[in-house]
Image (cartoon, rainbow, N blue to C red):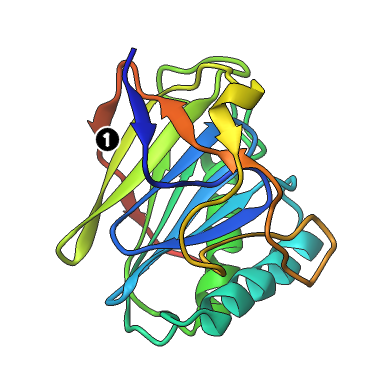
Amino acid sequence: MPFATGLILLGEYEFGYAADRIGFPSISACRAIVYQTTTGLFGFHQATGYGPLKIDRDARKFAAFVNGHAAGAGHGLNVYVGAKLGAGGTYSMGMPGAQEVAAEIGAIARELRFTGPVSCYDLSIGRPGAQGAYVEFVANGGICDIFANDWVEHHADGNKGAPTGNPGDHLISHAGKTDFSAPARVFLRADTTGQKRVEPMQIVVS
C-alpha cells in the first residue's frame, strides 16, 4: 500500500511548518487548518470540540505559533480548512455547521490579520459516521492543492518516531495550554490508498 513519508504529519494538538507540503492524519471530529504564506505552509491539527469560548483562545495560539516562527513574516495568501460538517464531525450538519466553520476560521483570520481568501472542504462527503480522513496540502504557486483519502488506523509504534527536521517546525500544545513543546513521538508515515484531489469552496468568514 502507498504511504506518505518524508513530510510533517500533524497529529492531534500539533502545529507545524513546511515549505510546500504538510499532512494531517485522522481527521474526523478534528479540523485540518492551513495558513499559506509566501514563505510556506503553517498547519494546526485542531482537536478540541467547537465552542465559542474555545475558538478565540485557539486562534490566538495558532497566530502565536505563526508569528513566533522564523518563517512567520511571509505575506498571507490563503487559509484552508478540511473538516467534516456533521457525519461524525464536531460541526453541525448543513447551514449551522457552515456558520460554525465561518466563526472558527474567522477568529483565526482576525488573529493573523489576514483578509484574503478562506476555503473549506467538507470531508464528510462519502464518509459516513465516524470514518476519518487523511488530508494533505501541497503548495502549487499561490494556492494549495488538497488531497484526501479514508484514514486507516495505524497508530502502532512502527509508524511513529521522534520528530525530524528543524527545531520549531513541529510542536505540540494541548487544549487549554498556551506554551509549545516538541512532541516526543509523531507520525512518520500515513496510508494514502485511494487518495484523490478535492476542490474546496471559498467561504465568507464571520
- Expressed as whole percent of the image width and height from the top left, the position of residue 196 reads 25, 27
* Label 1 packing within 10 angstroms: few (<14), some (14-19), many (20+): some
Q: Is residue 4 above or below residue 119?
A: above
| Residue sticking out furthest to the left | 141
Residue 147, can we see it?
Answer: yes
Count of labels in the image:
1
Query: Quarter of the image holding residue 37?
Result: bottom left
Residue 155, can we see it?
Answer: no
User: Is label 1 in a helix, a strand or a loop?
Assistant: strand
Query: Closest to the observer: 31 or 71?
Result: 71
Write the residue at 77% across / 61% down.
Answer: 54
Query: Closest to the observer: 47 or 99?
Result: 47
| Residue under label 1 | 198
| Residue sticking out furthest to the right | 176
Query: Quarter of the image holding residue 142?
Result: bottom left
Write the residue at 63% across / 19% down.
Answer: 130
Location of the N terminus (image quadrant)? top left
Q: Is residue 180 above or below residue 199?
A: below
Does residue 53 appear left or right of residue 71 in this picture? Answer: right
Does residue 195 appear left or right of residue 110 in this picture? Answer: left
Inspect the image, locate mark 1, and give the three-letter code of the amino acid beneath it: Val
- Expressed as whole percent of the image width and height from the top left, the position of residue 42 reads 45, 64
- Expressed as whole percent of the image width and height from the top left, the position of residue 169 reads 51, 65
Q: Is residue 48 above or below residue 27?
A: below
Query: Closest to the observer: 196 or 159?
Result: 159
Write the residue at 53% across / 62% down.
Answer: 105
- Expressed as whole percent of the image width and height from the top left, the position of residue 127 reads 48, 18
Query: Closest to the observer: 94 or 197?
Result: 197
Write the residue at 72% across / 68% down.
Answer: 180
